[in-house]
Image: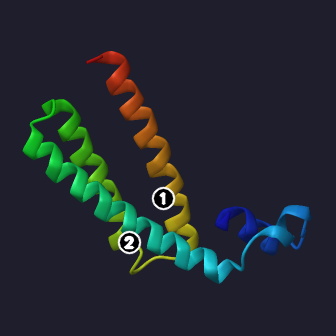
């Protein structure tokens, strides 16, 4: 939503979807909070995975995803909200692709 709204504001072409989106400042804050909440939940999930002794390949991929999102949270301190939104979309896409591939190539 942030990227859509920012694009419409930059091009000065405010279309129908624009009027239904929250203010761009609220979207920026939402991105930060959702990233932090997801990071905390992923941390708890990984700790439980170590405790239950899940398949190590999945735990290693989970740690990789954890590092990616940790990097995005750290980058949030020195980069623009637009870049954070782009990194979040890219990280989510990569995460879906790798975890799907992991389950596809190594079925349990």
Question: Label 2: how many residues lie within 10 Å, few (<14), some (14-19) or many (20+)?
Answer: some
| Mark 2, secondary structure of its residue | helix
Question: Quadrant where the N terminus lies?
Answer: bottom right
- Residue 59, placed above or below residue 91: above
Where in the figure is residue 62, as x and y percent of width and height?
25, 44
Q: Is 55 on the left-hand or right-hand side of 45?
A: left
Pointer 1 or 2: first along the chain? 2
Q: Mark 1 and 2 residues: CB-CB less than 8 Å, in contact? A: yes
* Total marks in image: 2
Q: Nearer the viewer, residue 11 or 101?
A: 101
User: How is the model colour-coded?
Assistant: rainbow
| Mark 1, secondary structure of its residue | helix
Question: Label 1: how many residues lie within 10 Å, few (<14), some (14-19) or many (20+)?
Answer: some
**Figure quadrant of residue 107:** top left
User: What's the residue at 8%, 45% (across, down)?
Assistant: 51
Q: Is 13 on the left-hand or right-hand side of 42?
A: right
Write down the residue under mark 2.
75
Q: Is 11 on the left-hand or right-hand side of 47?
A: right
Question: Quadrant where the C terminus lies?
Answer: top left
Where in the figure is residue 100, as x and y percent of width and height?
41, 28
User: What's the residue at 21%, 48% (across, down)?
Assistant: 63
- Residue 37, placed above or below residue 49: below
Where in the figure is residue 25, as x and y percent of width and height?
63, 83
User: What's the residue at 58%, 70% (across, down)?
Assistant: 82
Write down the residue under mark 1.
87
What's the mark number on residue 65? none
User: What's the residue at 24%, 51% (across, down)?
Assistant: 45
**Figure quadrant of residue 72:** bottom left
Real-space Cα separation, disc 1 to disc 2, in angstroms:
9 Å
Q: Is 107 on the left-hand or right-hand side of 63?
A: right
């Amino acid at each position: 939503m942030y990227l859509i709204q920012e694009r419409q504001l930059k091009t000065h072409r405010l279309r129908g979807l624009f009027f239904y989106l929250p203010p761009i400042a609220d979207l920026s804050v939402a991105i930060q909070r959702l990233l932090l909440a997801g990071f905390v939940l992923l941390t708890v999930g990984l700790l439980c995975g170590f405790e239950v002794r899940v398949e190590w390949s999945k735990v290693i991929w989970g740690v990789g995803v954890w590092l990616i999102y940790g990097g995005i949270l750290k980058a949030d301190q020195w980069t623009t909200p637009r870049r954070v939104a782009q990194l979040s979309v890219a990280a989510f896409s990569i995460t879906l692709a790798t975890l799907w591939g992991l389950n596809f190539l190594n079925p349990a």
